[in-house]
Amino acid sequence: MHDSTPHFDSIPFLNTGEITEPTLLTDDQREVLARIGKRLKLPARTTVYSERTRADSVFVIVEGVLKSYRELPSGKRAMSALLFRHDIFGLAERGRYLNSVQAITPVTLHQLPLADLIPLIKRDAELQFKFLAKVTQALRESQRRTILVGRRDAVGRLAMFLMMMRGHHQLAVGNDRDIPLPMSRTDIADFLGLSREATSRAAKALQRRGIVTFASRHLARIVDTPSLAKLAAAV
Amino acid sequence: MHDSTPHFDSIPFLNTGEITEPTLLTDDQREVLARIGKRLKLPARTTVYSERTRADSVFVIVEGVLKSYRELPSGKRAMSALLFRHDIFGLAERGRYLNSVQAITPVTLHQLPLADLIPLIKRDAELQFKFLAKVTQALRESQRRTILVGRRDAVGRLAMFLMMMRGHHQLAVGNDRDIPLPMSRTDIADFLGLSREATSRAAKALQRRGIVTFASRHLARIVDTPSLAKLAAAV
DNA sequence: CGTCGTATTGAGGAGGCTCAACTAAGGTGG
DNA sequence: CCACCTTAGTTGAGCCTCCTCAATACGACG
């Protein structure tokens, strides 16, 4: 199937048989979604929508990385999530978006107007089920992140983040030692619930201990995977 | 409708008209769910299920409070969520539960076997849509909690928690000053990502500042709502 | 090659964690 | 019914980590 149609996968609820593959959209379902939506190509730094604005669409990421965040009264920004290929975002509450979403890299999105999507998934229960599974997965991801920011140690948090990024990248490319980090250090800090400085020091600590090297600001290389995994798991 | 059938509500995606009411299950839907599931009454402290065990059911809370948590290697417990009336839990990944769930108060649950529920919601798209909305709401709740544990100040976190508990209780009862806290201090501490000691000190600080009084360990009374709201909102 | 925003490094201080002792409450059996 | 025991919660002291502020270094972009 051509890559221009929206696509996502999700981890199934049940374990059917021994092998568990992610649940994929069928070609037909992708066609249908492509029909009701339109494709969007946006340069980096574009704001897709801002919190509290009228919500009329859900988005599926075809390619690229985005961040979902909330501005706090103090001027700090609380990051709700980092969003990757095949993720869904824009689930609104009472017709308003709750977060702002901004592109970190250039992105390709599929915009699905709620006015069309809701009737569609109410007709097509199988398609809706894919959405249900995907939202459930996002919920689990969110809970994992709650555990992450609940940790006290900066190094462990960064390790957890790197393992997470590795997981995302690994799906796409074979190489699992080089981890591209498209987002800024500030974004990482916000994601981890740390200050920029603490994040920077944590990165240096990992490097000093020979676990990870940072070839550039946007490329990490895992040297000692077991140690990193151990740091990420601990606590 | 009799209270023995499972029930839940959720906040709609769209704003239809000016007034936005929560989306409720219809009587018919409750009937259908009641038919495929069975009712469960459990005393306090019962473990409904443990992490990594085989998942075969989703649960709807008819009455009572439960906690969902994960045991960490260090022996600490990371709380994933507190669960209240009309909440849903037990969404599994590949046939395994990810968290453990334990009753805090005596609870009444509706157990819905996945083997029956999945075919049902694949037939009944309207019913599935209610589940989709509910899971989405849980996702938002989880994101809010991520922001909560990301805060640095213990007092603010506790304030946020109290406002949250107020919201839950307010729905059921009119009184919005008395807040029952059925869970232990340890549970609150786990939920806030604080130590027991810090939680205790934060409670004392709120009391000293005349914002909240703790009549007993399980009953808080809000004295100065605006101040509490301000503390909860700030950051 | 200069400029501006981003990132790193350093020093000092605040807040929460840990450890330890003490107190309160709940449950049990005589 | 009360004394005891066990568990949960509070209080205090010291330490550790991260935050804040400030200065410097880096790097992307014009």
Image: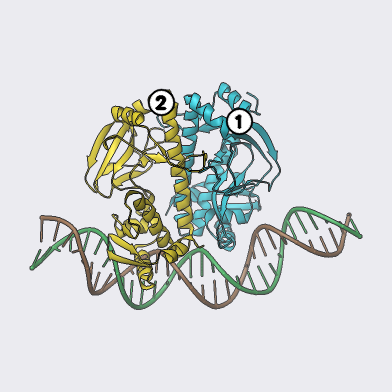
Chain colours: A yellow, B cyan, C green, D brown
Residue A90 image point, x, y percent = 36, 38
Q: Name the chain letter of the residue that bears numbered label 1.
A: B
- Name the residue rendered at 68%, 46% in the picture: B46
User: Residue A116 location, x and y as percent?
Assistant: 34, 26
Task: Left or right? Give the position of B199 relative to A48.
Answer: right
Disc 1 marks which amino acid? Pro
The answer to whether residue D8 is left or right of residue A122 is right
| Position above or below: B137 against A186 | above
Chain ID of residue with mark 2: B
SS category of the residue bearing label 1: loop
Residue found 40% across the figure and 29% down from its top: B15
Q: Nearer the viewer, mark 2 or mark 1?
A: 1
Q: Which residue is mark 2?
A: B16
Side of B35 relative to B43 (left or right): left
Residue closer to the observer: B197 or B177: B197
Total of numbered circles in the picture?
A: 2
- Whether labels 2 and 1 belong to a single chain: the reply is yes
- Is the residue A77 above or below the residue A25 in the image? below
Query: In which image quadrant can residue D20 be found?
Result: bottom left
- Would you name the residue on which mark 1 appears? B6
- Residue B39 sits in which quadrant? top right
Q: CA distance from mark 2 to mark 1?
A: 25 Å
Residue A138: % across, % down: 43, 43
What is the quadrant of the N terminus of chain A in the image? top left
**Residue A129 location (% of width, % of height):** 45, 32
The earlier-in-sequence mark between 2 and 1 is 1
Q: Given the current orientation, which residue lies at the most extreme front position?
A: A18
User: Where A26 falls versus A233 (above or below)?
Assistant: above
Q: Secondary structure at mark 2?
A: loop
Confirm whether residue A155 shows in the render: yes
Q: Amino acid at mark 2?
A: Thr
Q: Residues within 10 Å of mark 1 (few under 14, many from 20)?
A: many
